[in-house]
Image (tube, helix red, strand yellow):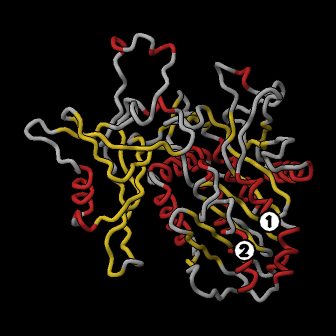
Amino acid sequence: MLNIKKTAKDLMKFIDASHSTFHVIKNSEEMLLKAGFTQLNPQEKWQLKPGGKHFVNVFGSTLVAFTIGEKPLSSLRVATSHTDFPCLRIKPMASVVENGYGKLNIEVYGGMIRNTWLDRPLSIAGKVVLKGKKAFMPRVELIDCKRPLLTIPNLAIHMNRKVNEGVELNPQKDMLPLMSMDGQKELAKDFFDDFLAEELKAKKEDILSYELTIYPAEDGCFVGPKEEFISSPRLDNLTSVKACLTGIINGKRSNGINVSALFDNEEVGSNTKQGADSMALPQIIERIYVALGYTREDYMADISGGFLLSADVAHAMHPNVPSKNDITNKPVLNGGVVLKIASSQAYVGDAEAIGTIHALCRDGKIPCQHFVNRSDERGGSTLGSMLTALMPMRGMDIGVPLLAMHSARETMGTADQTAIEALVCEFFSK
């Protein structure tokens, strides 16, 4: 079993360096390269052979890594997670100058708990597209400001006496971040473009577009007298991303093909060119088989006998609202990996899949627990059902239990990252 405290610190280090989906992929690539993986170009023909370890970057925010055993047709294992998270995204023409204040025009990405973003120091990360030598070959720069630049101030209780009774926040009106003001002279109408140009040391006229995320500027930390909890942004779902990377790097299977797929856009439906509800992963896996000299029928046969592990966070029983959980299935922090089950197949597991994961946990001495929605509550869904519909194979949804899922800061048990990483390693080793 992995060291609990070291694994938790490594997770926080990974999260604290991954402030946008593009930086998640950048940091994932660095981990894989350090472990001996080589990058493949999706626009070139692949030359693959048994024993190889490779990864493919899909449009900058999705990544597929795989290892090839000595007998590739032995079995196919796939572990998936998602790289995106609820946040604020900066719109084009973002500068808003009103009454001497410089604000940014934003939109909400995913289902965030909006009021948790108020009164926090916020920063900016993502990618900026600059003029290149050709129109179809622009220059792309990643940017991470790594310092507090913005805040979204609450209205004082004296001006909103009912604030503690619950206030609906209009994202277009109430959540525009305050960025700047200049008491000596009026702010430029495009002050944000000036800021980007200065930050990138580029000409303002060379900036063509951007995809920029606003993120909480506070890093993750331990909480509790024995550091039994982790409080951090983006636990959903970088806990699973880290587990999928650790598993594919440390998996010990000598035969078969192992695949870890890290997808963008889960929080907005996955129906994108780089999302799980696309042909991105089926095509990449088929290309692996073709590059190894196998037929499409070989590929389809291995898909049929494959197993998919869909890793995403689960709802822990809330200490103050335990009634929101099922009456017999109550996952708790530090209770181990959660097996997520739904007869609706919103979670993909069936009886055989549940049995398989239980056996892996038993073999690896990995603690596990169940999550099933209350029968009178509507639950969420994950990548598992989408992917197993595109690639018919058995699968199971798992994850670490969280409190305050989709808050600006979420809470998990310190020991649970060790459990999920151990399970994905076991999955890629047996």
Along the line of sight, the residue nearer the viewer: 87 or 293: 87
| Residue sitting at x 18%, y 35% | 100
Relative placement, left or right, of 104 versus 294 is left
Choose the circle earlier in sequence order: 2 or 1: 2
> What percent of the width, then of the height, locates residue 193?
26, 55
Q: Position of residue 108 (x, y in %)?
A: 48, 42
Whether label 2 touches label 1, CB < 8 Å: yes
Residue appearing at x 57%, y 69% in the figure: 58
Residue at point 66%, 42% (across, down): 416
Q: Is residue 362 above or below residue 174?
A: below
Instruction: Label 2: state its secondary structure.
Output: helix
- Say few, some or many: other residues with alpha carbon within 10 Å of mark 1 (under 14 / 14 to 19 / 20 or more): some
Residue depicted at 59% across the width and 44% down the height: 236
Which corner quadrant holds the C terminus?
bottom right
- Residue 397, percent across and down? 76, 49
Residue under pointer 1: 391
Q: Which mark is residue 285?
A: 2
**Frontmost residue, 369 versus 79:** 79
418 vs 362, left or right, is: left
Amino acid found under the numbered disc labelled 2: Ile
Tag 1's secondary structure? loop
The residue closer to the viewer here, 357 or 279, is 279
Question: Measured along the vertical axis of the image, is residue 257 above or below residue 180?
Answer: below
Q: Nearer the viewer, mark 2 or mark 1?
A: 1
Q: How many marks?
A: 2
Question: How far from the left and from the top, in percent, is residue 115?
Answer: 47, 28
